[in-house]
Image (tube, helix red, strand yellow):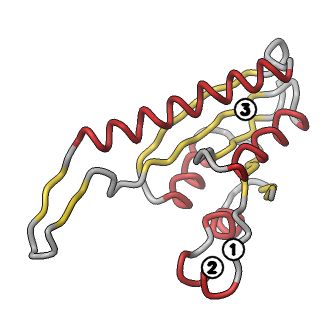
Amino acid sequence: MGTHVLVPLDGSSQAWAAFDHAVSNHDGGRITTLHVVDPMAGVYSDYGGGGYYDPQIHDQAVERGNELGEEAHDRAEEAGVLETTTIDTAVETGPAARTIVQYADENDVDHIVMGSHGRSGVTRVLLGSVAETVTRRSPVPVTIVR
């Protein structure tokens, strides 16, 4: 049985570069694409202590994750690896880094390949780095692709 590789996808060019890297370097195994939906997707506030939740917004975010998985399958087909490599899609809701690490831990993932936006300085401090957090907390090796 081949290696099980997890590739988080958010639709960015960096995430697609990571997926392409996984496809070209892990032929013969299993690649799972994971789209993490922000748990706040669909929550709106009026800044007065109230607010409301629109489940349609959350559903649209989940559908976007499924579409990314279909696009990944198409890219793998174009690369000609589907005869030897299995492509799976997962969509989970939660904080991105924590959800990626938890998914890897609970689903027998052997390796994580993910993109990095390469932010630095104040932007990185203010926004944090999902790739850095995953690298520090992951129970398996992580490859960061830029």
Q: Position of residue 26 (x, y in %)?
A: 87, 34
Of residues 144 and 100, the one drawn nearer to the viewer in this rendering: 144
Q: Is 114 drawn above or below residue 89 in the view shown?
A: below
Question: Which of the image's four quarters has the N terminus?
Answer: top right
Badge 3 element: strand
Residue closest to the far bottom = 122
Query: Marks 3 and 2, Cα distance to the nearest angstrom?
Result: 29 Å
Task: Say which residue label 2 marks.
Answer: 124
- At label 2, which amino acid type do we have? Arg
Of residues 83 and 29, the one drawn nearer to the viewer in this rendering: 83
Q: Position of residue 2 (x, y in %)?
A: 84, 28
Of labels 3 and 1, the one closer to you: 1
- Residue neighbourhood size for the residue with mark 3, other residues' Cα within 10 Å, grouped as few (<14), some (14–19), many (≥20): many
> 144 left or right of 105?
right
- At label 1, which amino acid type do we have? Arg
Residue closest to the far right = 25
Q: Position of residue 101 (x, y in %)?
A: 60, 55
Residue 118 falls in which quadrant of the image? bottom right
Residue at (90, 38) in percent of width and height: 25
- At label 3, which amino acid type do we have? Ile
Among numbered discs 3 and 1, the one appearing first in the sequence: 3
Query: Marks 3 and 1, Cα distance to the nearest angstrom?
Result: 27 Å
Task: Say which residue label 1 marks.
Answer: 119
Among numbered discs 3 and 2, the one appearing first in the sequence: 3
Residue 32 falls in which quadrant of the image? top right
For residue 31, the mark is 3
For residue 86, the mark is none
Query: Marks 1 and 2, Cα distance to the nearest angstrom?
Result: 5 Å
Residue at (75, 28) in percent of width and height: 30
> 116 left or right of 50?
right
Residue at (57, 43) in percent of width and height: 106
